[in-house]
Amino acid sequence: MDLKGKKVIITGGGRGMGRQFGTDLKAAGAIPFAVDVIQENLDSLKADTGIDGAIVDVTNEASVEAFFKGYVDKYGAPDVLVNNAGITADGLFVRQKGEETQKFQLSNWDKVIAVNQTGVFLCAREAAYYMVKNKVKGVIVNISSISRSGNKGQTNYTATKSAVDGMTVTWAKELSAYGIRVGAIAPGYINTEMVAKIRQDVLDKIIQQIPVGRLGEMAEIALAVKFIIENDFFTGRVLEVDGGMRI
Ligand code: NDP
């Protein structure tokens, strides 16, 4: 797909990697639109880059449906969806702390499943629905993670990111009949606020395990997003962009 003039919806587009994707895709000639939950971040995005946005909670079916309907009525069906919104709420599955045996909290399981799995499902479903209905041969890019293959302290996050991989392959097989491609990216540790939350000594140990010897940059993941959109032979696969690291 030639990016020029293409309509791209980016979830979690108000900050972090989503903001970078919007900025870089706009520079390549696309027309990005950000979906996020904090108005200030969307306002700053608009002021700095000119990219429009809307408040949408990706976990809420009614909000997601209303947003996509409104977007399509105004601009037409999107050419691309980048399913990027994601959160973490880490914890050990079961842990002995002194005399106390602790359990992973169900609330942290539910919270992460809602955004990273249900949110991805809902947004992809709406995007695919309007692409099919309007005969748009679009592209869906899902953001997975290096943690998809199992990471200590991330039962919930790992479950959602391996689900993202499975949904990517399933949708690629189903939607190829309509000329729609679906790919995913599994970034390694990237220089973002999400990673800044990791304790410095833990982060130092992580960096030692990255063959290129540093964190990834957001622009390096944006390049992967561009690659999947532009390469018409790419579908049903997960692109690993992780500096060579394996968890
Ligand atoms: P950020 O937390 O910086 O950005 C995520 C954005 O999604 C935020 O703006 C956040 O809003 C928004 N968001 C959260 N919940 C919702 C919701 N319910 N509806 C709509 N938007 C929501 O994350 P990153 O940029 O670091 O990560 C982006 C993606 O990349 C995620 O899917 C993450 O799992 C994945 N990833 C990140 C890695 C990294 O190293 N950072 C590595 C591998 C994968 P708010 O401002 O309220 O938080």
Image (spheres, rainbow, N blue to C red):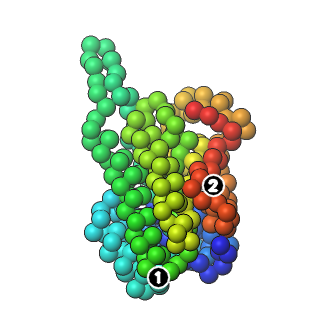
Callout 1 crowding tier (Cα within 10 Å): few <14, some 14–19, many ≥20: few
Three-letter amino acid code at the position of disc 2: Ile
Label 2 element class:
helix
Rendering coords of residue 222 (x, y %): 63, 59
Q: Residue most toward the front?
A: 177
Question: Which residue is pictured at 33% across the width and 59% down the height?
Answer: 59
Q: Which quarter of the picture shows residue 110?
A: top left
Three-letter amino acid code at the position of disc 1: Asn
Rendering coords of residue 197 (x, y %): 48, 41
Along the line of sight, the residue nearer the viewer: 33 or 157: 157
Callout 2 crowding tier (Cα within 10 Å): few <14, some 14–19, many ≥20: many
Please give left or right for residue 243 compared with residue 142 in the image: right
Q: Quadrant of the N terminus?
A: bottom right
Along the line of sight, the residue nearer the viewer: 167 or 141: 167
Q: Looking at the picture, does residue 34 appear above or below residue 120?
A: below
Q: Which quarter of the picture shows residue 99?
A: top left
Mark nearer the N terminus (2 vs 1): 1
Q: Quadrant of the C terminus?
A: top right
Please give left or right for residue 230 compared with residue 107 in the image: right
Q: Report which residue position mark 2 lands on.
A: 221
Label 1 element class:
loop
Rendering coords of residue 227 (x, y %): 67, 62
Along the line of sight, the residue nearer the viewer: 224 or 40: 224
Distance CA(mark 2)–CA(mark 1): 29 Å
Q: Which mark is residue 134?
A: 1
Rendering coords of residue 52 (x, y %): 49, 76
Question: Which residue is pictured at 62% across the width and 50% down the height?
Answer: 239
In this rendering, the label closer to the viewer, 2 or 1: 1
Question: Which residue is pictured at 64% across the width and 43% down the height?
Answer: 242
